[in-house]
Image (cartoon, rainbow, N blue to C red):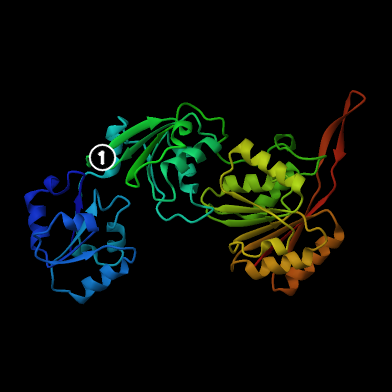
Amino acid sequence: MHIIGIDIDGRAGLSSSSSNLILSADILFGGKRMLELFPDAKGEKHPIGADLQKIVDVIRANPDKDVVVLASGDPGFFGIADFLLRNFPKDEVEIIPAVSSMQWAFAHARAPWSHAAMVSLHGKGEGRDLDTLWSALEQADTVGIFTDPTHTPAVIAGALREYGYADCRMTVCEDLGEESERVTEGSPEEMEGREFSPMNVVVVRKKGETSTPRGALIGLPDSAYAHKNGMITKAEVRAVSLAKLALSPNCVLWDIGAGSGSLSLEAASLMPRGRVYAVEKDSGMVEFIRQNMASYGSRNITLVQGEAPEALAGLPAPDRVFIGGSGGSIRGILDASDRALKPGGRIVVNSVLLETMTEATAFLTERGYNPEVCTVNISRTADLAGRRMFKAENPVFIVTGVK
């Protein structure tokens, strides 16, 4: 099997050896436009659609025939080579790359790409769709983006403005190699209201430092967050709770009774490829969460306004559950959490009430967990008539269970 890349010059850009392979192939796969470039090819022509498994089935049903798969640009760069190499032995596959549309886009943008990050937004699911872009922008000054009909340049521009990258520059390259080819450069604000050809590639370049903090947020002082009358998980308790959660980079976390969102924000920063579902019933607290998300550029938090356990219905199954507030419904919340929690997942409960701690421990024991309880006692220095003393905070019970 040969996987042959076609660049923006189409058939004219192929070497004679590649052309001969295509024209003499017994079976030829490719997009409709690519197949139309070769009306004189003798083999069976199979358009590539959404069901890539059909390619595998046809090839396996014809083991003695010469197969050529046509691809756009470099087949190994966010292309079909990855899929085919996962389904066929490597020694049965030969890849002949061409210049990719991304290389052309960087050339048109007059930007080097040796240190750039690359992102494909094809087929990304709702909620996590732009997480890969934010992760790339946090690590690189320049990012190349393969778009799709949902993640258009205008949509990307609006998201860039909303999440702290309003001063970056965008280059949109449309219909590369066609008579309608167009290259447009501008700010996200200038790009947000425009329409572009579906065939486009985007290059984003940051301009200096953004105002959005980067990196992990661990135990920030309470004053760093918008909150009401001290109603916030204290910094030291936050740090211990995060340790008990044992987060991984791609976790799904439910933060139930999220309050001001301080734990959600710090957890989100520790799991760049994961997602936090911050569940909070109080509309005033929800506004604090929104303020804090905007202040810290938190992009992998989904805010869920509603009362648990009812508000938990339909959320993706969690790897971790943090319960910071239960409103007297601890058993119902734990029941819903336990039913949804993935095997090996963790539940962590914070409580200042002995009754809540006792009920949570009893419930987890009933369900086969081996709960651990620790108490966090915090005292902080305070002024007293020009001298220093320790002022104690309420003790917090932290209950941890592993499923």
Please provide percent x and percent y for residue 131.
Answer: 50, 48
Q: Residue at x 72, y 64 (%)?
A: 310
In this orientation, does residue 233 appear? no
Q: Is residue 347 above or below residue 10?
A: below
Residue 210 vs residue 311, the one in the foreground = 311
Residue found at the very far right of the displayed protein? 385
Image quarter of residue 213: top right
Q: Quadrant of the C terminus?
A: bottom right
Q: Residue at x 59, y 67 (%)?
A: 342
Image quarter of residue 191: top left
User: Please, what is the three-letter code of the amino acid marked with disc 1?
Assistant: Ser
Residue found at the very far bottom of the displayed protein? 61
Q: Residue at x 68, y 47 (%)?
A: 263
In this orientation, does residue 349 appear? yes
For label 1, the SS is loop
Query: Where is mark 1, residue-wise?
Result: 180
Q: Judge left or right: residue 393 versus residue 344.
A: right
Please provide percent x and percent y for residue 106.
Answer: 30, 35
Q: Judge left or right: residue 305 versus residue 208.
A: right
Q: Is residue 239 above or below residue 43?
A: above
Residue 202 vs residue 246, the one in the foreground = 202
Residue 184 vs residue 139, the one in the foreground = 184
Residue 184 vs residue 105, the one in the foreground = 184
Q: Is residue 350 above or below residue 204?
A: below
